């Protein structure tokens, strides 16, 4: 079918979308309604951890759909329990609450920190967050986010989110008051353009939090579940958070997120937290399929290895074409173009059958499936090269 055959006018306009309708995906590839094929280095925003419709996910969903979809969060189900145990056995702290989106998991993290502050810190509730941070699109998570321009949206803002500067420990100290209960940070600021928090900074933050009796809250929604070559990005820095949130890749494309916390911080009382779809068996089965694949021997080493291969290829391209820095870790990588050509490069790459994203006007972001092949990486980099040649860059 043609684009004009689809009733897209019935959808609310929330973002500028190209005149395409995607109808099928397999691995690193997507097909539009006119049969054109695209190499997908967006993967639903680092969501399809194993690519489109991977066999373990398809099988788990089909079997679970035929067995039990949802029995209410007021009952235990086997899949949610198994997934929580898989997470906690592999660095996902001690207790897990499942949610349906990253923003919802972060809302839960904010609530849990405030509850802990009410119980143990005399009602402290402020959570220090960082310039350019992205934590979601609910009212509280938008207030916690420091995306340029968001400060004037949907007023009045939820209070209690003082701002510090990433990789500047002194700015965090300045933001701390007697009302502060925690610090929330992304190990790599994804939406800001793949800006890594330095390992020394994360260690300093963990030490500062311990010294001041504050909670270290890591938003691993984009960096978790193998994206950086380790199951969780905090492992690179050797810190242990008190609270961690997961989303995106954990469901392999199915809506699933998680709020993880240490035993000491897991202080919700009955009725404090919940949600109709939270921990439903279908989404949890998807999470188990993803996690078992990512935890299989050698898989994460492969992610790290393919990440280096991608970063090396982009660095070579950057040197040859006089572009800027390549940054990130594992398969979350950005290329700085040195000029505000991101939007143009993204559009022309799409015309050539490559889907990439430009989180900032001057940067391209690459977040392929964790099982992307070297040939697919070569093809993506060659397409970007061809686009830059066309643009005379
Ligand atoms: C995507 C993202 C979120 C929000 O997740 P949603 O599922 O879109 O609500 C929060 N934090 C980070 C770091 C993210 O990348």
Image: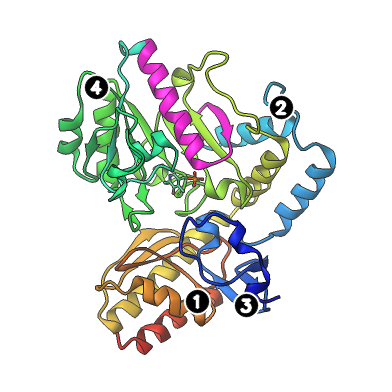
Which is closer to the viewer, label 2 or label 4?
2
131 is within the stretch colored magenta:
no
- What is the C-alpha distance between the residues marked 2 and 4? 39 Å
Secondary structure mostly taken by the magenta-highlighted segment of the chain:
helix
Front-lying residue, 271 or 226: 271
Residue 270 placement: quadrant: top right
Residue beneath the point at 22% across and 46% down: 167
Front-lying residue, 89 or 146: 146
Front-lying residue, 237 or 390: 390
The image shows residue 375 at horizontal and vertical percentages of 55, 77
Mark 2 C-beta to ligand 1 under 8 Å: no
- What is the C-alpha distance between the residues marked 2 and 3? 40 Å
- What is the C-alpha distance between the residues marked 1 and 3? 10 Å
Residue range in magenta is 92-119
Label drawn at residue 212: 4
Extreme-front residue of the structure: 9
The image shows residue 109 at horizontal and vertical percentages of 44, 30
Residue bearing mark 1: 350
Provide the secondary structure element on which disc 4 rests.
helix
Front-lying residue, 248 or 138: 138
- Check disc 3: other Cα within 10 Å, few if <14, some if 14-19, many if 20+: some
Provide the secondary structure element on which disc 3 rests.
strand
């Amino acid at each position: 079918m043609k684009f004009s055959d689809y009733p897209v006018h019935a959808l609310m306009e929330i973002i500028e979308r190209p005149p395409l309708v995607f109808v099928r995906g397999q691995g690193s590839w997507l097909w539009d309604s006119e049969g054109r094929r695209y190499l997908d280095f967006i993967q639903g925003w680092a969501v399809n951890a194993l690519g489109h419709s991977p066999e373990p996910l398809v099988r788990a969903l089909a079997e679970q759909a035929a067995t039990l979809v949802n029995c209410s969060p007021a009952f235990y189900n086997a899949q949610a329990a198994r997934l929580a145990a898989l997470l906690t056995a592999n660095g996902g702290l001690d207790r897990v609450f499942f949610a349906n989106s990253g923003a919802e998991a972060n809302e839960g993290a904010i609530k849990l920190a405030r509850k802990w502050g009410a119980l143990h810190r005399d009602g402290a509730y402020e959570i220090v967050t960082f310039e350019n941070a992205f934590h979601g699109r609910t009212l509280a998570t938008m207030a916690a986010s420091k995306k340029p321009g968001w400060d004037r949206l949907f007023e009045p803002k939820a209070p209690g989110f003082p701002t510090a500067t990433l990789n500047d420990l002194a700015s965090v100290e300045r933001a701390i008051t007697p009302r502060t209960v925690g610090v929330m940070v992304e190990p790599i600021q994804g939406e800001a353009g793949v800006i890594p928090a330095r390992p020394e900074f994360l260690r300093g933050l963990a030490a500062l939090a311990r010294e001041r009796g504050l909670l270290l809250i890591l938003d691993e929604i984009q960096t978790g579940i193998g994206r950086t070559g380790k199951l969780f990005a905090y492992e690179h820095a050797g810190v242990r958070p008190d609270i961690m949130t997961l989303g995106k890749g954990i469901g392999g494309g199915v809506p699933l997120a998680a709020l993880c916390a240490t035993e000491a911080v897991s202080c919700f009382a009955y009725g404090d937290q919940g949600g109709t779809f939270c921990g439903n068996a279908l989404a949890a089965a998807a999470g188990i399929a993803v996690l078992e694949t990512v935890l299989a021997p050698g898989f994460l080493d492969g992610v790290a290895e393919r990440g280096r291969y991608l970063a090396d290829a982009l660095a070579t391209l950057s040197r040859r074409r006089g572009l800027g820095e390549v940054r990130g870790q594992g398969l979350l990588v950005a290329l700085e173009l040195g000029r505000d050509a991101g939007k143009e490069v993204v559009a022309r790459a799409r015309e050539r059958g490559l889907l990439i994203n430009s989180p900032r006007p001057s940067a391209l972001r690459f977040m392929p499936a964790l099982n992307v092949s070297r040939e697919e990486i070569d093809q993506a980099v060659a397409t970007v090269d061809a686009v830059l040649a066309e643009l005379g860059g």
